[in-house]
Image (cartoon, helix red, strand yellow):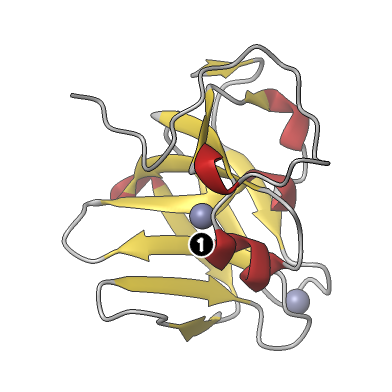
Amino acid sequence: MATTATPPYEGGCLCGAVRYRVTAVPELVCHCHCTLCRRAAGAPVVTWATVASEGFEIIRGAPASYSWSPRTKREFCGRCGSQITFRFMGRDTVDFTVATLDRPEVLEPDCHVWNAAHLPWMRMDDGLPRHEGEFDPD
Ligand SMILES: [Zn+2]
Ligand SMILES: [Zn+2]
């Protein structure tokens, strides 16, 4: 993962009720084209950074959450609706939305995931690797 600044990074929702701090360098940054992220964010693609759980903390407010499936949880501001995190049960990592960082430009994406669902009019000719499903490091 390429970064132009060392942690901590801070971010938060649109209204400011929820704020978070990232104290570790994320392992991976990916554009997700899946239909669940699309609906959750109301956007054609959502860019996520994956960081060790101990490297992420909510420092203001308490996000609301929604589980589309028993194994996943999305956290968002219950007041303004900004999507903040995605957690996969049983993993000791948390994904957070790069676009909610105060300085989103410091984390540069590595790849695309769920490319099979990508919208044809959403052109992102960035040359990054495209995984048809979930990123699989193996
Ligand atoms: Zn908010
Ligand atoms: Zn997704």
Category of crowding for the residue at label 1, using alpha-carbon neighbours closer than 10 angstroms: few (below 14), some (14–19), many (at least 20): many
Q: Residue at x 54, y 54 (%)?
A: 34
Query: Which residue occupies the extreme top position in the image?
Result: 127
Which of these two is toward me, 36 or 59? 36
| Image x and y of residue 83, in percent | 64, 67
Mark 1 Cβ inside 8 Å of ligand 2: no
| Image x and y of residue 85, in percent | 51, 62
Q: Is residue 100 left or right of residue 30?
A: right
Give above or below for 51 relative to 35.
Answer: above
Give above or below for 73 relative to 114.
Answer: below
Q: In which quadrant is the C terminus drawn?
A: top left
Residue indicated by mark 1: 85
Give above or below for 59 relative to 33.
Answer: below
Q: Residue at x 63, y 71 (%)?
A: 40
Q: Residue at x 57, y 62 (%)?
A: 35
- Indicate the quadrant where residue 88 lies: bottom left
| Image x and y of residue 39, in percent | 65, 71
Which of these two is toward me, 10 or 107? 107
- The amino acid type found where label 1 is placed reads Thr
